[in-house]
Every structure is written in structure tokens, then in C-alpha cells.
Amino acid sequence: MNSPWVRSWSLGSRLFFSHLVVMIVGVLSLVIISRISSPRFFILHLERLENEGLDLIDVRADLVQGFENAWRRSTLLSVLVGATAAGGLSYWVSIRIVQRLTEMEQITQKFAAGELNARLPKSNIPEINRLGASFNSMAASLEGVEARRRELIGDMTHELRTPLTVVRGYLEELADGEIEPSPEIYQQLAKETKRLERLVNDLQELSKAEAGYLPINIQSVNLRPLLESIVNRLADQLLEDGPVLQLEFPPQIPPVLTDIDRTEQVLVNLVGNAMRYTVSGSITIRVWTQADKLWIAVIDTGIGIAGEDLPHVFERFWRSDKSRARHYGGTGIGLTISRRLVELQGGQIEVESELGKGSIFRFSLPLA
Ligand code: ADP
């Protein structure tokens, strides 16, 4: 069956041929067995009749001959009818299976050519149906990835355009002698370039987080040393008359299951935001447990976020009009990454805020 000649056969021919072989073996064994056994049984029957007293001596040869003729004819007829019916049926089954597969092949080719909404229809052959369902779910997830990729590139180019335009504008004006070079202009150029750098770094992190490529190394961790070191480090950056940064960490807090570096990234982003949007008052990191979770909240007394904006804060590139207008220098990506990082660690992140009063960003982590 493995000769190069057979290897080049299509699935339809293979199915048809295998049915044919099964049919030939069946017919041959039927014919051979009945050819051997039927006349014997007939003769045994005649002998029994003769033993019972029936005189068949003159007609016996005729009867046996007649039986054999009848057997031959009916066998020939049944082989002809049976072979035609079985051959036809086998052809129909092969065609049906091959048709479904050819259809699948055409649809997958369409998909590969960029028609990402192409889906396989249902089939009443369970195996083909299952294959189709797996293909369709793979196609749906690839379509989603492609849609997110396009959206990301669209958003990204939009965000990159503004600082690039500013930098180009300054450079052209400087080149044309329309403005005099001054430290302020160079500072402005450096600021825009820094913004570009931040955007590119954040985008790299975001694309990794969205594609699920961020390695997460979960361990049982006591968070107190991490929180204390973040508070010490960031408190140094606060102005004298700015907000105070404080930690409320009750004793007896159990360890959590987390990737310490990722949790630090989330905390630095939340506390960094709180510092950026809080002029005075306080920024408090509060820790508590609830059921099988540990919650960490960053509570500030800053500018707050309007109620209608709250559902958008975790969307990428979203920034409130206030933070755009005052050029806080944010990229609108930090919270999107934070949410993804918290979710990758099996937690959730929430926000509560009131405009002009302050915000509470809290996230949970599973207890060890
Ligand atoms: P970035 O701060 O880099 O702009 P984020 O994703 O961290 O990006 O935040 C998105 C937006 O959410 C910010 O631009 C700001 O408008 C708003 N925001 C985040 N944190 C706070 C906060 N503590 N107080 C007020 N607004 C905030």
C-alpha cells in the first residue's frame, strides 16, 4: 500500500479503493464458501430424502445440475446488484467526505489570504465538525489579535505624531533662523524627546503585556519590605510643600502569591500617578486582607477623575482632558499595563474617584 503509485492517490480514490477491497473480499468469501458448502448441503438433503424412502435415483443428477445452475445465476445476480449498490454507496461517501475537505481547504486559503472573517460551515460528520469548530475558534482569536494590532498601531502613530510635530517645528524654525536658539527651546526639545522615549518604552511593555509574553514568576512573598522601600524611595521626590506619602500596613499581614517585580511595577505606576496628580494633602498606601485576597490601595487627595471618565481609565492612551490640558507628561499606557499585570497574577484592579477630592486605585493579589 506504500508504493509511490499508491502514495500519489487522492483521499477520494483511497477511500473508494479501500471500500472496493472490503467488498471484493466479502463477495469472494461469500461465493467461495457457498460454492463449496451449498451443493454439499443439497446432496445431504437429497440423501436424507432417499433414506426416508423417496426414490430419486433417476432424477438425482438432474436435480443437482438444476441446483447448481440456479445457484450460479442467483449468485451472479446478487454479486452484480450488490457490487453496483456497494460501489455507488462507497463513491457517494468518498465524494461527500472529500467535498467537505476541499471546502475546508478553500476557506483556510481565503483566511490565509487575509479574509479574516472566513469561517467553516457546520458539518454533520462529527470529526469534521470538531475540526471546523477548532479552526473557527483559532480564526476568531487571530481576527481579534489582528484587530487589536491595527488599533494599537493606529493609536500609537496618533500619539507619536504630536511630539514629533513639535520637535520638527522647532528644528525647522531654528534652521530657518526664525527663532533664536535658547536654553528654553533646547529644554522644550529635550522634554518632547523624553516623552517620545517614554512612549516607546511604554509601548514595548504594553505590546508584550497584551500579547501575553510577559514572564511572570509567582512566589510566596511578604510585601512589607517592598512597600517600605517604595515609600522611602518615592518620598524623596516629593516637594517640601507637596503631599505626604504614608504607608498603613497592619501587623500580621500574611504573604501573597505574586511576582515581586511586577507588583513593584504596578505600585510605582499607581504611586507615581498619585504624585503627579496630587498637589497637596496625602498619598496613602493602605493594605488589608479580605477572604483569600490581599488588597493594596493607593489613596490620594489629588485632582480626581470625573465619574463619566472612570470606565475609561484603564483603556490604553486614555488621559483625562485635565491631565492633557496641563501637560502632566503622561502617556495613558501605565494603567493599561498595570491592569494586565494584576490580572496575569490572578488579581483585579479597581478605581474610585471624585473630581477635585481625590482617587483610590486598589488591586488585589491572592494570599499564599
Ligand atoms: P499616564 O499617567 O502615563 O497618562 P495612566 O494610564 O497611568 O497614564 O493614566 C491614565 C490617565 O488616568 C491619566 O492621564 C490621568 O488622566 C488619569 N489618572 C491616573 N491616575 C490618576 C490619579 N491618581 N488622579 C487623577 N487622575 C489620574
Image (cartoon, rainbow, N blue to C red):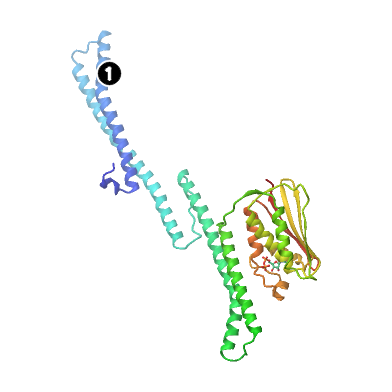
Q: Residue at x 65, y 64 (%)?
A: 334
Q: Quadrant of the C terminus?
A: top right
Q: Amino acid at mark 1?
A: Phe
The image position of residue 103, as x and y in percent, is 42, 54
Q: Residue at x 34, y 47 (%)?
A: 12
Task: Give the side of residue 204 with respect to residue 238, left or right.
Answer: left
- Which of the two residues, 343 or 110, is positioned nearer the viewer here? 343
Q: Quadrant of the N terminus?
A: top left
The relative height of residue 85 versus residue 231 in the rendered view (above or below) is above
Neighbour tally class for label 1: few under 14, some 14-19, many 20 plus, Cα within 10 Å: few
The verdict on label 1 being within 8 Å of ligand 1 is: no
Task: Give the side of residue 225 with respect to residue 280, left or right.
Answer: left
Disc 1 on helix, strand or loop?
helix
- Which of the two residues, 335 or 141, is positioned nearer the viewer here? 335
Q: Residue at x 78, y 49 (%)?
A: 251
The image position of residue 140, as x and y in percent, is 53, 56
The relative height of residue 235 versus residue 97 in the rendered view (above or below) is below
The image position of residue 120, as x and y in percent, is 48, 53
Q: Quadrant of residue 205?
A: bottom right
- Image quadrant of ligand 1? bottom right
The relative height of residue 119 versus residue 176 in the rendered view (above or below) is above
Q: Can the viewer see residue 57 in this picture?
A: yes
Residue wearing tag 1: 41
Task: Give the side of residue 106 with respect to residue 368, left or right.
Answer: left
Q: Residue at x 50, y 50 (%)?
A: 134
- Which of the two residues, 314 or 129, is positioned nearer the viewer here? 314
Q: Quadrant of residue 43?
A: top left
The image position of residue 329, as x and y in percent, is 67, 72
The relative height of residue 208 versus residue 329 in the rendered view (above or below) is above
